[in-house]
Image (cartoon, rainbow, N blue to C red):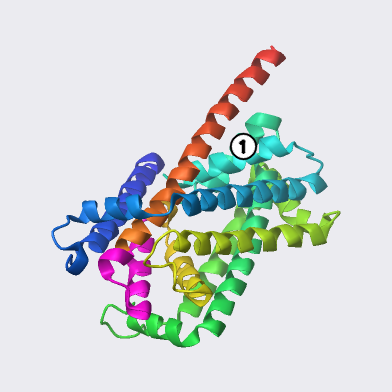
Amino acid sequence: MNSKLKSVLQYVVTIGITVALLWLSLRGINIGGEHEGEGKFDLILNAWINADKVYLLLMAAILMFSHVLRAERWRMLLQPSGHRGTFSNSFLSVMVGYLVNLAIPRGGEVSRCYNLFKLEKTPVEVSFGTVVVERLVDILCLFILVAISFIVEWDKLEMFMSSLDFSGGGTKPKVSPLLIIAIVGVGGLILVIYLLRNNPKLKKLLGGFKEGFLAIFHLRNKWLFIVYSIAIWTLYFLMSYVVMLAFGETANLGMRAVLTIFAIGAIAMAAPLPGGAGSYHLLLPMGLVSLYNMDRADAVAFVFIFHAWQTLVLALFGFICLLISLWLIRWKNQQTK
């Protein structure tokens, strides 16, 4: 199959799954009680109108500040490889990456490296190596936060996880998943070794990737890198807390509830869907309803607005940064002529 056609089909399937999950989330709303007579979209619109916009603006500010720290942390990782770029170019590229991620799952990692290359000629393979390091650090931070959530709210999260049936009603697989992973891993390693022995371009590409990946061991200030990483994920958690204060239905749930919602949100965002759309809208309302007895209509409205507001902020600033990047790239190209 043509690689371009395969990419298009994969994208169509991803969008289809996202739309289906969003539809399932809205379909589950039974409007009654104080919302009697409201349509589903009217319900979400009214929730937006009644939300405290000060808290929503504060959430947007926290979100953008976390990306400022992320851009500076990325710039730190690039310095050991000899690429002392500017903070502004790093920030522009990070935001362009988030913009692309909203349309193409995991596409932002490559696009921000390419954007940085166009701005300051940092080799894509080197910058991509540092992005992989970033993702590994983020996974570690996320794991720690989720672990804390499970320790603090074990009863609630255990109840929620047990209510999810991932087996589809079938029997347990006879082949161990670990065995499958091991076979695929060994096969992949053999393939990589074969390709490297027969393709000098791939050798160069892997060398650049290795240089970027190992940059973390050559940082001048490792403690500052750790502080940035902790601060970024603390801001993500604070963002969840602030947005819950914006709605009367969630404002009084407390900090422990924020931990629970953060953990469920992390599980939902792990799905390879654009910005976590669909999985986030399906799982998070389930948690709010089953664990905190929240009205399902209110829970769905809250999650839709939370996710939509965050997406809008990222899309707006990402688009602005894309325009600035394109202008800078064009200006630099004209200067070199």
Q: Position of residue 287 (x, y in %)?
A: 37, 74
Q: In this view, does 197 lie above or below 279?
A: above
**Residue appearing at x 53%, y 32% in the figure:** 320
Q: Split into 4 quadrants, where in the image is the N terminus?
A: top left
Q: Give the range drawn in magenta.
A: 277-299
Q: Name the residue under label 1.
A: 92
Q: Report crowding for label 1: few under 14, some 14 to 19, many 20 or more residues within 10 A (C-alpha).
A: many
Q: Which residue is drawn at 36% across and 72% down?
A: 288
- Does the image show residue 193? no
Quarter of the picture containing the C terminus is top right
Residue 102 screen position, x and y as percent: 44, 46
Would you say the magenta stretch is mainly helix, strand or loop?
A: helix
Q: Picture coordinates of residue 36 (x, y %)? A: 15, 63
Q: Given the current orientation, which residue lies at the most extreme right position?
A: 220
How many discs appear? 1
Q: Quadrant of residue 165?
A: bottom left
Q: In which quarter of the image is residue 273?
A: bottom left
Q: Is residue 112 above or below residue 24?
A: above
Above or below for 253 versus 98: below
Residue farthest top in this picture: 337
238 or 229: nearer the eye? 238
Left or right: residue 186 versus residue 45 is right
Of the pair 102 and 109, the residue shown nearer to us: 102
Q: Mark 1: which secondary structure? A: helix
Residue type marked 1: Leu
Tell me residue 42's x, y (percent): 22, 52
Whether residue 117 appears in this view of the structure is yes
Is residue 290 within the magenta segment? yes
Which residue appears farthest toward the left when viewing the image?
37
Q: Which residue shows up at 74% across the image and 36% down it?
A: 86
